[in-house]
Amino acid sequence: MKIHPRIWMTVRRRRVRIYTYVLVIIFVFLIIDILCYALRRRSPKKFIDEMDLFRYANVTWPRRRIPRVIHQTYRTYAIPAIWNSTVQSVMKMNADEFKYRRWSHADMDTFVRQHEPHFYWNTFVSYRYDIQRIDSFRYVLLFHLGGIYIDMDNACHRPFRELVATMEALDPNSTHLALFSAAEVFGIQNNFMISTAGHPIYKQFISRLHLFNHNFLIYHVTILLSVGPLYVTIQEYFFKQTDKQVVRTFDNRIYRSMFWKTKGGTWFHRDTLMILYLYYNRHHVLWYCIIFAMWIAALLIVIVLFRKKRIRYILTALTLKIIRIRLF
């Protein structure tokens, strides 16, 4: 029995469509699987909690690996009046065990040029904003010297010895240790960091800075993503931890128990203030957006309905009935 050519062509087209759909589905699943593999966290996140601090804050038995030095940066060696109390707090609270060093912008430039010449000439000097050079300098500094970096607008309630001793006690056999403070929303911050010298995560920070050296349209987002907390968060997410190279974070409860802050944000612009306003008033802003969206939706419904005469008559009749019911 011969099949009509048109029927045969229809069958062939259906088969081709089925095969195409199957291939597309397989391709989509492969892409999803590849993305999930590429974007997966390289290793479980490790923390320091309040119980760890309670147990190990005053121990003396761990092998010392973190240099006992505190780093801070500013344009010059002078301390701004607004940060005098915070800087003095950091110095006095840790004077017994830690050395203190302040880095000027000229020092930063010289240090990066000497220790990371490739990064210096290809990325560091091309940064548009000073805050980008300041942030990137922190990573170069901790990679080569280690120790503690803390912003000048942070002050101490308790000595750094407690955190450092806890880090060294929790991972007594690890060669490299690093600690970051957790951000309020997600990820980690770069305003306070502790590290051994030569930690691979800082090498990763430095080696990938050039990939993020772009203008992301909004000033605040450009800083956060090119060198700031968002950049650090992304790099930490993809960093592969081992028993010899450990990265830990601590949450806001520990941060509030150990530090207090004064006015900072000298690099903020108007868009930063707007973003911060929206963040701190996000619940009110959300309600305003919902109300505005409901008003727009109601307006569109009224416009569509009143374009049709029949519906207009029905609405008029319903309105009159409602009025009669209320009156009588």
Image (cartoon, rainbow, N blue to C red):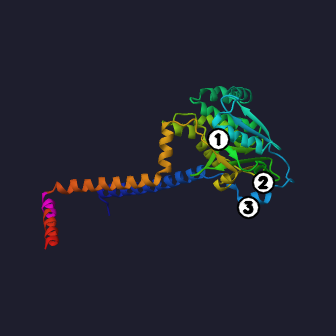
Residue visible at 47% across and 56% down?
Answer: 25
Callout 3 amino acid: Met
Q: Which residue is mark 1?
A: 153
Whether residues under marks 2 and 3 lie with C-beta atoms below 8 angstroms apart, the answer is: no
Name the residue tied to disc 2.
166
Residue lying farthest right? 61
Residue at mark 2 to residue at mark 3: CA–CA distance: 10 Å
Which residue corresponds to the image point at 47% horizontal and 52% vertical from the top-left?
282
Residue 51: say if magenta: no
Secondary structure type for disc 2: helix
Residue highlighted by disc 3: 51
Q: How far, Cα to Cα, is label 1 from label 2?
A: 24 Å
Residue 320: in sight, yes or no? yes
The circle drawn on residue 174 is: none
Q: Quadrant of the C terminus?
A: bottom left
Q: In terms of secondary structure, where does tag 1 sit?
A: loop
Q: Secondary structure at mark 3?
A: helix
Residue with the most extreme bottom position: 328
Which comes sooner in the sequence, label 2 or label 3? Answer: 3
Q: Give the magenta part as a residue range.
A: 309-315
